[in-house]
Image (cartoon, rainbow, N blue to C red):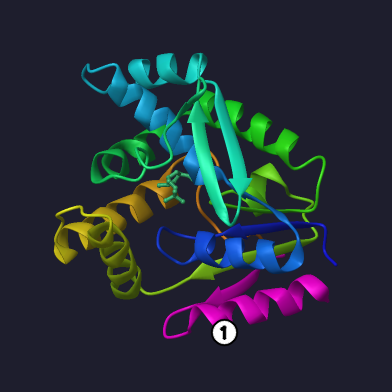
Amino acid sequence: MKKVVAVDGPAGAGKSTVAKIVADKMGYTYIDTGAMYRAVAYKTLQMKKNVTDELILKAAADIDITLRYENGATRVFEGGAEITDKIRTPEINAIVSQVAKLGAVRDKMTGLQRKMAQSDAVIMDGRDIGTVVLPRADLKIFLVASVEERAKRRHKELTEKGHDVSFEEIKKSIENRDKTDSEREIAPLKQADDAILLDTTGLTIEEVTAKIIELCQG
Ligand code: DC
C-alpha cells in the first residue's frame, strides 16, 4: 500500500469527499489542508477590521490550529475552540485565496502539514501537496472537473447547510478562486509532473474512489 498520498486539484473537484472515503477504507489519516487556510481566514475575519495582508499575517502569526479526524469527518479547532462549521461559509470562501497567496502564511502551513505527514499513512488534500508540501509522496493524484459540475456540487453542499447563495454566485466565486490559486506566485495550483490526472466530470463518487483505491494498492 502507498504510505503517503497527495491529492490536489481545484475547488469542488471532489478531493475531500473521495479522500475521506479512501482514508476510511484503507486506514489512512486524512489531512484537509484547505481547512488550515480557512482557519486563518476565519481568525482574520474575527478581528473585525478591513481585511488587509497585514491583518492576515497577524492572524496567521499566532494561530493555533488542530485538525482532528474522527469518524469520517475532520474537526477543526483554533486555540482550543471548535470552528469546524464556521470555516465553510461564503464569507470565508471570498477571502481564503487572498490568505493563501501570502508566503509567510504558506510557509507556516507547509511546515505544519509536513509534520502531520510524518507519523502515519496519510492522504492529504490541497493545491500544492504533490508539488511543494510532499514532493516525495508515494502517489500523487490531480483531480479535476468542469467548472459547471464543480459549481453544482458546491451549490448543493452550501444550500444543504442552509446558506442562501445562487448557482451563478458560486460559479463566479469558483472561477475567481481557480484564477487566484493558479496564478499566484508561490506554490500555485498545478499538476505535479509525476501526478496522475483524474477528471471526475460525469463520474460517481464510487467510481472515483474505486480508481484511487486501486492506485493506492498498486
Ligand atoms: O480546498 P479548500 O476549498 O478548502 O481550500 C481553501 C483555499 O485554500 C483554496 O482557495 C486555496 C487554498 N489552499 C491552498 O492554497 N493550498 C492548499 N494546500 C490548500 C488550500
**Is 192 one of the magenta-colored residues?**
no
Q: Which residues are magenta?
A: 194-218
Q: Is mark 1 within 8 Å of ligand 1?
A: no
Tell whether position 204 is magenta: yes
Closer to the camera in the image, 170 or 22: 22
To which quarter of the image does residue 169 belong? Answer: bottom left
Mark 1 residue element: helix
Horizontal relation, residue 213 to residue 56: left or right: right
Q: Is residue 67 above or below residue 172?
A: above
The residue sitting at 54% across, 57% down in the picture is: 190
Residue 195 in view (yes/no) = no
Residue at the front extreme, as displayed? 71
Dividing the picture into quadrants, the one containing residue 210 is: bottom right
Residue that carries the numbered disc 1 in the rendered image:
207
Residue 156 seen anywhere in this rendered image of the structure? yes
Residue at horizontal 28%, vertical 67%?
156
Residue 148 locus on image (x, y percent): 28, 73
Residue 181 screen position, x and y as percent: 42, 48
Q: Residues within 10 Å of mark 1 (few under 14, many from 20)?
A: few
**Amino acid type, callout 1:** Glu
